[in-house]
Amino acid sequence: MRSNQLFWGVILLLAGGLMLANEMGIELPNGMSLMELLWPLALMLGGIWVLIGVFFRGKVKLENASIDLQGASAASLKIKHGAGELRLHSGANSNELAHGSFVGGLDQKAARHADRLEVRMKPAKDVMDFPFLGPRAQLDWDVALNPQVPIALTLNVGANKAMLDLRDLNLTDLKMETGASDTQVTLPARGRYGADFDLGAASLAVTVPDGLSARIRASIGAASLAVDEARFPRNGGYYQSPDFDSALNAVDMTIDAGAASIKIK
């Protein structure tokens, strides 16, 4: 039985029992109705459950998985990841799009359309509990991608820590949407591609490899933005390498952020 089902089962039994006792006219010795105990007891049980979640982690399986390339010459990969750590880097074999270790299990779907493989990856459904209730497990993923295959990469991450070493990958596009996360990303060193970051209350540190030109445009609210202007001089409302338009390797980066801390070097 899932931990949250157990918790809510206890709450429902408690509420139903107190309501039944109230309808039967059962009272405490001091004349207080049993229904008056409902919310204090529910809050106490909720507090105990939260403390259990702090000091005890749930046990979830570690799954090792590989995604076959199926002979495709390009790929679209969408990764959704929640609480825990996400490590992403090159290292998959020539006949794979990806392989890795997935704490909590992996729910993945892959379909080939012409020469393109479309893949979606997310944690297994049976471990997606409410993040603030009960014993929890940290869903740590370590994923290696094929560095030779052109990949359009989309990342949707929640309250996690992401370490993305994309330097050796062949990305045609990068999109990342984050919640309350801490993200460190090294961008691919080759090709001309776009990188779009949509940030919540996040910390983002971007490393632009030597030899990669960049144009950086940011729309920020209560966010701090620090850009290495020696490499990317400010030009009106954006930052840009002097050779951006003619460079063989370049990234066109856009950032939309709320209460975030952003560093680009």
Image (spheres, grey):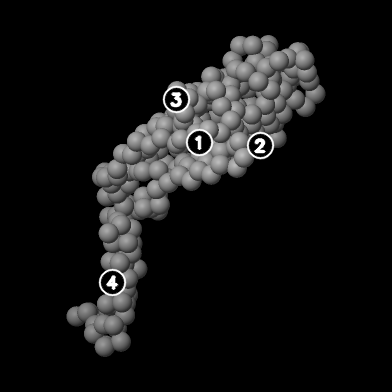
Vertical comparison of 136 with 250: above or below: below
Alpha carbons under labels 1 and 2: distance apart: 36 Å
N-terminal label among 3 and 4:
4
Alpha carbons under labels 3 and 4: distance apart: 55 Å
What residue does disc 1 label? 70
In the rendered image, residue 138, in percent from the top left (x then y), is placed at 35, 40
Q: Secondary structure at mark 3?
A: loop
What amino acid type should be assigned to the residue bearing mark 1?
A: Gln
Instruction: Report the disc number at residue 256.
Output: 2
Instruction: Report the disc number at residue 14.
Output: 4
In the rendered image, residue 136, in percent from the top left (x then y), is placed at 32, 46
Q: Residue at x 30, y 67 (%)?
A: 9
Query: Residue 211 falls in which quadrant of the image?
Result: top right
Instruction: Work out whether residue 48 can be spotted.
Output: yes
In the rendered image, residue 61, in percent from the top left (x then y), is placed at 29, 43
N-terminal label among 3 and 1:
1
In the rendered image, residue 190, in percent from the top left (x then y), is placed at 62, 18
Vertical comparison of 170 with 135: above or below: above
State the residue in front, 143 or 238: 143
Instruction: Report the disc number at residue 172.
Output: none
Q: Secondary structure at mark 2?
A: strand
Alpha carbons under labels 4 and 1: distance apart: 53 Å
What residue does disc 3 label? 93
Q: Secondary structure at mark 1?
A: loop
Tag 3–tag 4 contact (CB < 8 Å): no
What amino acid type should be assigned to the residue bearing mark 3?
A: Asn
Choose mark 4 or mark 1, whichever is in front: 1
Q: Residue at x 40, y 52 (%)?
A: 125
Residue lying farthest to the right in this orientation: 236
